[in-house]
Amino acid sequence: MIDWYELVEREGNSVWRTIHRLVRNHADADECFQETFMAAYRLSQREKIANWPPLLQRLAIARAIDRLRQRSSRSRREDPIDAAQAVTHRPDASARLELEERAQAFRWALAQLPAEQAELFCLHELEGWSCQQVGDQFSMSTGAVAAQLHRTRGKLKQMLEPKLHPQS
Amino acid sequence: MSTPDNENCHDVVTLAVSALQQTSPHDDAPAATISRTIARLQGAVEPRRPALLGRIVAMPWKAKIGTFAATAAAVALLCTLLSPLGESIALGQVLEKLRSVKTLSFVMEIYSPVPGEHAPPSKALVWIVEPNKTRLEMETPDGSTTMIVNDGKILTLVPETHSATLMSAAGGQMDPQKTLNELRAITDHDARPLEEKVMDGVRCQGFEAVRGSTKASLWADARTGQPVRIEMQVQDGPRMVWSNFKFDQPFDASLFSLEPPAGYTLQQVGLKESETRE
């Protein structure tokens, strides 16, 4: 018998940070958070879950990517970033703006990728999963994961370069 | 394939990933989000009961009697535990919401302490950010006043006269955050349960607590424990009602700025030289 209260209390902060980092909007993060645990519940009805943290992280990433794609398809020019967050960390105004611009461009680019590619990339690059861990979750070989990551980087580069013009 | 183009690709993508990580908030899941999620999960789990009943119906008679007896015992135990109080949620759950909240806004009504006087209450909108920021916008028959408490200082703004006063917040000015901290300190020993009531269509469980010269009634959603209404009566003093709670909403930092709006005349009272600038 799964103690859902205990699970939400134990894993909630980690799930929240994973989602909030990507969607960067309190209301969207709130919905994705609930949907993550509801998806986990539905999955637990079909199969026995041996290891909750990676499953919840994967579900959270998937919900957050979905939300980014929905926003993108609605052609919103700007994401509604929470005002409180926008003033939280402030190294200095222009550096902050530049970081925000890059982060925003990255969110937009993620939303243009096929969902599974974006999920796989986020788990590896943002959550620090190894290729082996990603492969276990997606039923792929380590080599296939590495190749997929390489292709995804290439696509992201094509999308991001015109937007960010890095000085290299 | 390590071409210059490929390296550039890594640069721009790595920069973007790094920017996302650097601008990420590191906050915890809001208590309200957790409670909504748990409520949804409970809602999802409960419809499974007919399947359980179906299985009981299909049981042989001996097993049915055994199950029935065990269920009756469990229900009796539950009734024993709950009957002296009769509440569907515990006071601890309600207080936990108040203790764990990071930002809170609500409507505060203050009723005149004069017996027999039925003047309409003064109304205020209150925003609180833990641990030390409060904004209070009050409408009284005499006009409106805004008070901002931030980092040990209090700024009072009077729009009618365009005057602003900055002073030390120490010394008992009316600060809802202090009242909130007093509410948080309530224990089971201070409180007794009240009859359930429906408020704004929500079934609410009440608790009454007395601390010092203040009597407080806390009304919370009987299903989730989310506070709905808090009433406080100070002996020989005003009665206050807090309602329309919003938990852990993001607030604009400018709400708590100690900089008076343009056009206001600022007067500083009793602040040391080092305290006059943020």
Image (tube, helix red, strand yellow):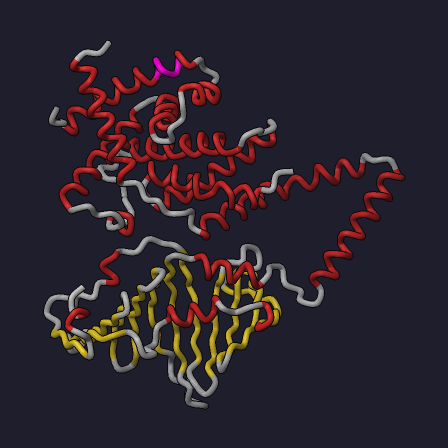
Which image quarter: residue B91? Answer: bottom right
- Which residue is nearer to you in this view: A9 or B247? A9
Q: What residue lies at 54% left-to-right and 48% top-to-bottom? A: B39
Q: Would residue A146 be counted in the magenta stretch?
A: yes
Q: Is residue B236 above or below residue A73?
A: below
From this viewpoint, which residue is outermost toward the bottom?
B115
Q: What residue lies at 30% left-to-right and 75% top-to-bottom? A: B170
Spot occupied by residue A70 in the image (x, y as percentages of width and height):
34, 33
Spot occupied by residue B134 in the image (x, y as percentages of width and height):
31, 66
Quadrant assignment for the N terminus of chain B: top left
Spot occupied by residue B274 in the image (x, y as percentages of width and height):
17, 69
Which image quarter: residue B164? Answer: bottom left
Q: What residue lies at 50% left-to-right and 80% top-to-bottom? A: B212
Q: Quick check: B5 left or right of B129?
A: left
Spot occupied by residue B171 in the image (x, y as percentages of width and height):
32, 79
Visible in this render: residue B194? no
Residues rendered magenta in the picture: A144-148
- Which residue is nearer to you in this view: A153 or B108? A153
Q: Quick check: B115 left or right of B278?
A: right
